[in-house]
Amino acid sequence: MAKVLVIGAGGVGSVAVHKMAMNPDIFGEVVLASRTRSKCDAIAASVKQRTGRDLATYQIDADDVAATTALIGEVKPALVVNLALPYQDLAIMDACLAAGVNYMDTANYEPREEAKFEYKWQWAYQEKFKAAGLMALLGSGFDPGVTSAFAMWLKKHKLKTIRTLDILDCNGGDHGQHFATNFNPEINIREVTAPARHWENGDWVETPAMSVKQTFDFEAVGPKNMYLMYHEELESLAKFIPEMERARFWMTFGDAYITHLTVLQNVGMTRIDPVIYEGKEIIPLQFLKAVLPEPSSLGPTTKGKTNIGDIATGEALDGSGEKTFYIYNICDHEDAYAETGNQAVSYTTGVPAMIGAALMVQGVWKGEGVFNMEQFDPDPYMDMLNKHGLPWQVKELEGPLAF
């Protein structure tokens, strides 16, 4: 049994610590810290009610490396699980190095001043973690995370090579709001409004945000419009599956969401550069975040399902020629809420965070340096998905996507 320190008390942090508390044979003690301690205390109360286990809580500004280092030194965890904002990844990695503790996150670092998603900043820590004899695991959420494990499982068990890969992320849930995001509004809108990029023939192809649309019929959800976007696992997949000719990421959005987002962009509310308002500097997107519904409040009203998975085409392992496989998970919003008090978007990230942490503290996945999901055996991860609320299925398709 291990002690872990979780930083971040949003929906993902809530799901992760609930699931950790449900597995006392792996996580002997769970500590939760955030900028707002009252959020930690509310999650701890829910964990106590649902599992009977107590969580220690702390207030921490994760941008403050010295303070975070001191907290790690006080708590003495075997692992720090970073479920805070992506802006804070490097500061928390620095604190882990200073304190001599392993690190894990679910999303790659991005600078506050630019919506740019790349692993280069975290990959640059490779030698630091290796020299310290520490391990950092990047991106153990769903996408990134499970989607990478899906691809590597297919490559291990079904396909000798992967020629094309499409990641399809569908949230078929309805929360009843005119406009709301299912995770942190600031991060969500930065991600959606950034230019789309996909990997093709050894290079990145960039297209304007939300300019490429296709329709796909998702099991348990139905036909949905999905848009070509950039997502960070494309970068690590292109690195660790070098034969891949094309990799794309698609996410579904309803027409009402697109309409609201277009208006907000047109009037400047999605800007991330500062403007002067009444003599003070504000960031429009941060102000917008403050007036939008808090994602963690959407759990009681969200109904429907998510469907997220990979479609991969390549040379079959059994020598039978080129084949296409679709591997995916379907998650029910109401089931996720009943178990953890959070909707499925948080659940599908928080459960994989727990699983990545479990494999690290148990020594199933281990090493010195900075690692992506694709570098480890997917089988134990995939087994735990089935056991802990995210069962997956795989089926052979007649051929690759027609688009």
Image (cartoon, rainbow, N blue to C red):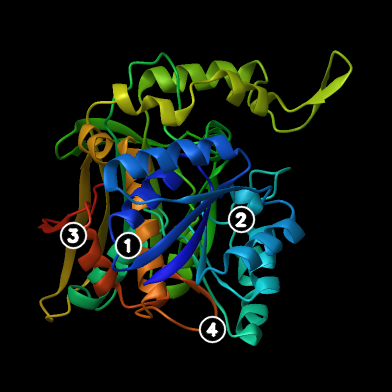
Distance from disc 2 to disc 1, alpha carbons, whole Å, reads 26 Å
Quarter-of-image position of residue 373: bottom left
List the residue tagged with mark 1: 164
In the image: residue 12, left or right of residue 170: right
Residue 80 at x, y = what percent? 53, 64
List the residue tagged with mark 4: 368
Would you say residue 209 is visible in this rendering? yes
In the image: residue 294, left or right of residue 161: right
Residue 37 at x, y = what percent? 58, 40
- Kindly indicate whether the residue at mark 3 contacts the one at mark 2 (C-beta within 8 angstroms): no
Q: What residue type is labelled 3?
A: Asn
Vertical order, 104 against 367 (above or below): above
* SS type, badge 2: loop
* SS type, badge 3: helix
> Which labelled disc corresponds to residue 109?
2
* Dot placed on the residue nearer the N-terminal end, 2 or 3: 2
Q: Residue at x 59, y 85 (%)?
A: 133
* SS type, badge 4: loop
Distance from disc 4 to disc 1, alpha carbons, whole Å, reads 31 Å
Q: Residue at x 37, y 77 (%)?
A: 376
Within 10 Å of disc 2 (Cα), the crowding (few <14, some 14-19, many 20+) is many
